Image (cartoon, helix red, strand yellow):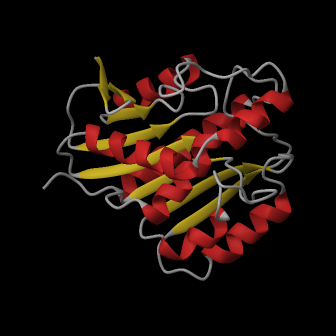
Amino acid sequence: MRQEVVEGGARVVVFGPPSDRGVVLVPEVRGIDANIEVYAGKLVDEGYVVAVPDPWFAAGAVPDLSSGQAVAAAVASVDDSAMLRLVVRARDALGPVTGRAVVGFCMGGLYARMAATVVPGFSAAVEFYGRVVYPTLTPAKPVQPLDLLPGRACALLCHFGTEDPVAPPRHVDLLESRLATQPSPARVYRYRGCGHAFANPGQPTWNAEAAALAWARSLRWLDEHLPEAG
């Protein structure tokens, strides 16, 4: 089952029938592509209703992603506040669920972590290799993501590769040290020898073993931290 919700210049795609538990799945810079649809289907198979916000609907098309430089420019162009408003729309599109989680990959991983700190209504969050430190602040990205962490209220699980230039180990160290000072549950896993996007089979850095392990850990995290139907 797939349904598109278009309202106020925003688009959210909902996968699966209504359920007591729901997941907002925030995509990579490529938007709602085949890989994200596969992960949405996996979550539906686990009994979740899944809402995926479209980061490029308002722009009319996915931007040029033909080079690493183009990808970096596209990510830099995304306004943090606007993207978090899309996450809110996706959260609301889940319907009257008992428990809500947010899961994201790459660019979406960053927004899953940010949503865990500033968007109410989530009990759990899972991040796959989002950027930890912005190289510079801009009008679109006016606050370092680490500075938002004191507002975190839900359980946060993070996955990073040790060879990831987007989220290098020294930045992950900073994230772990900040999370260690907070009362809400948090865990960071590092995957030795893995680069960025190791959970995306369409990328040359894909690592099937690490991807499967990270996904299994993510499902356990959701099961542990989402409330059961009352």
Give residue 132's quadrant in the image.
bottom right
Give the residue at x 32% y 33%: 8
Left/right of residue 30 with respect to residue 54 in the rendered view: right
For image coordinates 27% across by 37% down, the residue present is 93
Report whether 150 appears left or right of 192: left
The residue closer to the viewer here, 134 or 38, is 134
User: Residue 57, percent across and down?
Assistant: 48, 25
- Residue 46 visible, this orientation: no
Question: Which residue is located at x 55 percent, y 56 percent?
Answer: 113
Q: Would you say 170 lies left or right of 100 here?
A: right
Residue 200 in the image: above or below residue 132:
above
Q: Position of residue 174 (x, y in %)?
A: 75, 70
Residue at 63% x, 25% y is 30
Q: Position of residue 104 (x, y in %)?
A: 54, 42
**Quarter occupied by the C terminus:** bottom left
Total residue callouts: 0
Considering every residue shown, the one lying at the far left of the view is 230
Percent position of residue 9, x then y: 38, 30
Above-or-below relation of 107 to 14? below
Position of the N terminus, as image quadrant, is top left
Can the viewer see residue 194?
Answer: yes
Q: Residue furthest front?
A: 139
